[in-house]
Image (cartoon, grey):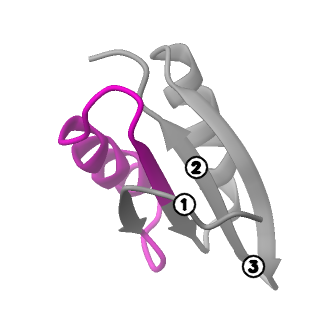
Amino acid sequence: MDEEYDVLCDIRGDKCPMTYIKARITLEDLKPQQVMLVLIDYAPAVDNLRRNFTMEGQQVYGIEQVGPGEWKLRVRKLTA
């Protein structure tokens, strides 16, 4: 998978709801069309982040399990 992104949000070690809160704060600093790469090690957060950011109108893509219990996903900021 291509590793292009504008900011890294490493929320490994965090549980919901802190995973979303930290990722949302990081996303707020991005300009439209910029991409945030999120590193996660808490399985419920993968679906929660995908669902919440999609509901906000952001583009979530590139969800990939990269190891046992570890995922990464990308969020492209589409709306302010």
Residues under labels 2 and 3: Cα distance? Answer: 17 Å
Residues under labels 2 and 1: Cα distance? Answer: 10 Å
Specify start and end residues of the magenta stretch as a single range: 11-37
Rendered image: mark on residue 4: 1
Q: Between disc 3 and disc 1, whose residue precedes?
A: 1
Residue type at mark 1: give it.
Glu
* Secondary-structure class at tag 2: strand
Side (left or right) of 47 relative to 68: left
Q: In this picture, is 55 found above or below 68?
A: above
Q: Position of residue 39 (x, y in %)?
A: 54, 69
Q: Position of residue 44 (x, y in %)?
A: 67, 53
Rendered image: mark on residue 15: none
Q: Position of residue 40 (x, y in %)?
A: 57, 68
Q: Residue furthest bottom?
A: 68
The residue beneath circle 3 is: 69
* Secondary-structure class at tag 3: loop
Q: Which circle, 2 or 3, is nearer the viewer?
A: 2
Q: In this picture, is 67 found above or below 60?
A: below
